[in-house]
Amino acid sequence: MIMTLERRLLSLLSLMLGASLVLMGLRVEVALRDRATARRFEALEGVAGALNEAAGWQAIERGTGTTILNASTPAEALLTRFGQVGERGDEAAARAERHLEVLLTDFSTSELEASVQRWRQSLATLRAARAGVKRHGLESQAWVSLATQNIGREFDLRDVALRPVGDH
């Protein structure tokens, strides 16, 4: 059976087309993997930035709350400022939550989930304690301890989230 030139060219073109399709498939796979990596890094950057911002506002809130608790009659402006910095810390925490949902949905680990739960609990405790600060129903040291614990949980969560995937 003798192959004609036309058959040889058709066979060669078929082989080249098959090789091109395989290479194109590999490129698509790499692109999809890169897209997932970019999505993960975007979420990590958002989490880290929002948690750092929340911790900063909550550190100011901790100091303002301590001043309120140690004052015999705190000024109205101080109480207003306490509410404002609490709101800003909550806004940053809400942004962190949105980015955490991406991580928990697509890139979750048991350590990340546990760290998120600890942070959510300490944040809820901090939010509940704010009313006690406003009405002088807390000891100054208890407030400082609660606020500091929450800030520590935020840094712990950030560290767990940013840890390289193989180290979880």
Image: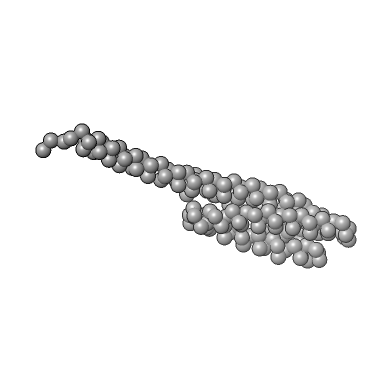
**Residue 156 visible (yes or no):** no
Q: Quadrant of residue 138?
A: bottom right
Q: Position of residue 132 (x, y in %)?
A: 76, 65
Of the pair 123 and 27, the residue shown nearer to us: 27
**Residue at position x 57%, y 49% from top?**
43
Residue at the left extreme of this rendering: 1
Determine the residue positioned at 73% across, 51% down.
57
x then y, percent, for residue 93: 66, 55
Q: How many marks?
A: 0
Q: Nearer the viewer, residue 47 or 63?
A: 47
- Judged left or right of residue 68, residue 5 is left
Q: Is residue 31 above or below residue 122?
A: above
Across and down, in percent, residue 36 comes to 48, 48
Tell me what residue is drawn at x 81 percent, y 66 percent: 135
Is 152 or 94 nearer to us in this picture?
94
Colour scheme employed for the rendering of this structure? one colour
Residue 35, above or below 9: below
Q: Residue at x 34, y 39 (%)?
A: 20
Indicate the quadrant where residue 26 lies: top left
Q: Is residue 118 visible?
A: yes
* Residue 30 percent across, percent down from the top left: 42, 43
Q: Quadrant of the N terminus?
A: top left
